[in-house]
Amino acid sequence: MTLSQLEIGQVGIVKEFTDLEMSVKLMEMGCLPGEEIRISRIAPLGDPIAIHVSGYQLSLRKFEASTIILQ
Amino acid sequence: MKADIRVALVGNPNTGKSTLFNILTGLNQKIGNFPGVTVDKKTGICQLPDGRTAEIIDLPGTYSIYPKSKDESIVFSVLADKSKEMIPDLIVVILDASNLKRNLLLYTQIADLKIPVVVALNMIDVSEKAGITIDVGLFAEKLGVPVVPISARKIKGIDQLKKTIAYANKVALQQNTIDVEVIAPEIIAQIKEELKIDNPYFALQLAHQHETLNFLSTTESDRIEHLEKEFSFHSQKAQATETIARYNFINDLLYDTVKKPETAHDETVSNKIDKILTHKIFGFVIFFAILMFIFQAIFSWSAYPMSLIEDLFIWLQNIISKVLPAGPLVSLLVDGVLAGLSGVMVFIPQIAILFALISILEDTGYMSRVTFMMDKVMRKVGLNGKSVVPLIGGFACAVPSIMSTRNIENWKDRMITIMVTPLVACSARLPVYTLLIALVVPNRNVWWIFNLQGLALTAMYLLSIVSAITVAFVMKFVLKARERGYFIMELPVYRMPRWKNVVFTMYDRSKAFVLQAGKVIIAVSIILWVLKSYAPGDTFKHIEQKYSQAQYTKTMTPDSLTKVIASEKLETSYAGIFGHVIEPVIKPLGFDWKIGIALISSFAAREVFVGTMATIYSVEGDADKLESVQQKMHSATNPDTGKPVFTLAVAFSLMMFYAFAMQCASTVAVVYRETKDWRWPAVQFAYMTVLAYTASFIVYHWLK
């Protein structure tokens, strides 16, 4: 299951990434393996999404979220 | 002045770094809540409590020492470049106490460079309110550096911070955070040895960033490249390993020193606001309502101060022409300098209002929500959610907006944004539009609240957005992508705008407008005055002689005689000759040679239009009655037909030309500076001129 499949309010824990380049950027922003992510909201047009991670809010595109595999 | 020590401010975006910089230096600047507003390197002098001075360098906000944009690459090069004497004696790392985890990543990277560090724990009041308890003593002990809790917004803890800066150790005392050498042992050892570097993390950074660091010689850089291959060093893999190790360190540190409740109070409030502001329907309704409000505010709030400024200049011109004897110098002052100056000053109210509103939107954090909402649409047309801010900023001025595209990481998205930003109706077009709209559109309300003139202006603004998006869409297919685009962006917590900052932005932008645009406008006004006051040879003498003959003096009133002489002089002057030369080209657009003069001089800057009009038309009308530009243009008639020059068709054709043409020398210069290639501004200038001519042509023939 990937992060992009979660609905608003659902929580997941990061397991691994499918894309090395993206993973480096995501990890810097606090999306690390073992970290809990909650979907805060989805943009009015369905993309990007806003997630709650490491104590703050981060926005990323659906495609980027699909590179994050959850436990 | 040479300062005693050099201090660099480093921190994540939205941590209050710029606010702290302002407090420490007293030198104010533009600050926003949107990530990446602090673009250029800013420095200021801070008086330390021990009598010494510190030069404070405000480095761009970044989440990591690994740069993701042009802006962020400055951070490591400043901290690493030993050759340029830029290297700071001390680094103040600003951490957001309410969001320590992510903030600490950058700290651990900086700390490992082993430059002396002081930590400023900002927003301590916010984090306390949110129920977060930080054991500052233990925190400082574990890091091995002084930690000062502060609140930059409330100006608390600043004296303590200054003291700590003054008495900070000259040697780096911080604890190691992670074992750097484990990440890539061979290459670190080799670089340390060959480049005579003793810091392993510095060596590792050279391995990562050597391609973009200009202080490395080509041989050094090539050698590192070779080492990378030899030891099969994979930059991204190494970075991933490092980041995971750093967060492990951070988690351990926070486990011992910080206690926090499940969700922070601040964020729940922010969440509630977001539910409305980024709502499916309300989100867009509110966004467009805000845009409408900005345009209406620019128009209605500025009306009174604008007429006040105009009247003041007319009064001044009257006094001067009465008190001083008539002559070429007085004419230069009244018709050249003062006419041009009035054209500049009159737009201060509009510019101040626009920038005040934009800075409020940035400061509160709303701008990043606009980015969030618009990304999907923007991507469809070849732009990026982050292009929204330069485009909206384009309503104020293309120059700072093009500079702000530096935080768009993707090359193609950035280029397209740069290419289309000048199409957005900037504040310099506003004078042109207001003048022409007021001239031909009746000042009447329709549907109770909508002013016809306001609607016409809104239409011009909408046109600018539509054209920018259309051109972007075309360029999406023309330009080839260099790398993948991504959109990983912090949504900062909503905050109240800092009113002091809003007022300062108003003042600062207006001042910049008066000084920068003003210089050009006054220079152009003077040149124009010379061009229209002098003619080749003794043409003017001949005209005067011609009209002193009895057949004229007896049949005409002295009033109409002066008028005829003046307009014949203008036509034969250098300006007139120039205007006539280009008239055949612009005739199909409905412009005569007088408008031609204004068009040409506007290529320096659009605002020049109004001043030029004032200068050119000051020859008409009653000699002893000074009028505002609008009155002058209103009474301008075509000598051949006797009909008014500024008909609906001409006025709108002219507005189209100003909407599309690249009439701004500063923008051309800044596009070159940002792209480092003359072809970009050249292509931009060409396509915009073609668009302008075509649009004017169509509109003129349609409305005629």
Image: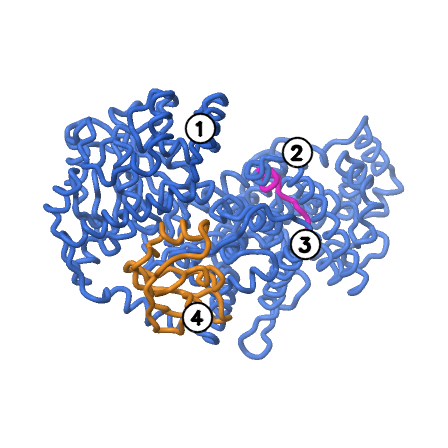
Chain colours: A orange, B blue
Q: Is mark 1 in CB contact (under 8 Å) with mark 2? A: no
Chain letter of the residue carrying label 1: B
Does label 3 or label 2 sit earlier along the sequence? 3
Q: Is mark 3 in CB contact (under 8 Å) with mark 2? A: no
- Classify residue B362 by image quadrant: bottom left
Cα–Cα span, label 1 and label 4: 42 Å
Q: Is mark 3 in CB contact (under 8 Å) with mark 4? A: no
- Identify the mark at residue B477; answer none if there is no mark: 3
> Which mark lies nearer to you, 3 or 1?
1
Provide the secondary structure element on which disc 2 rests: helix
Q: Give the percent coordinates (x, y) of residue B457.
A: 60, 63
Cα–Cα span, label 3 and label 2: 44 Å
Marks 1 and 4 belong to one chain: no
The residue most toward the bottom is B447
Which contiguous range is marked in magenta?
A: B660-669
Against B211, residue B466 (above or below) is below
Marks 4 and 2 belong to one chain: no
Q: Which residue is mark 1?
A: B227
Chain letter of the residue carrying label 3: B
> Which mark lies nearer to you, 3 or 2?
3
> Which mark lies nearer to you, 1 or 4?
1
Chain letter of the residue carrying label 2: B
- Identify the mark at residue A5; answer none if there is no mark: 4
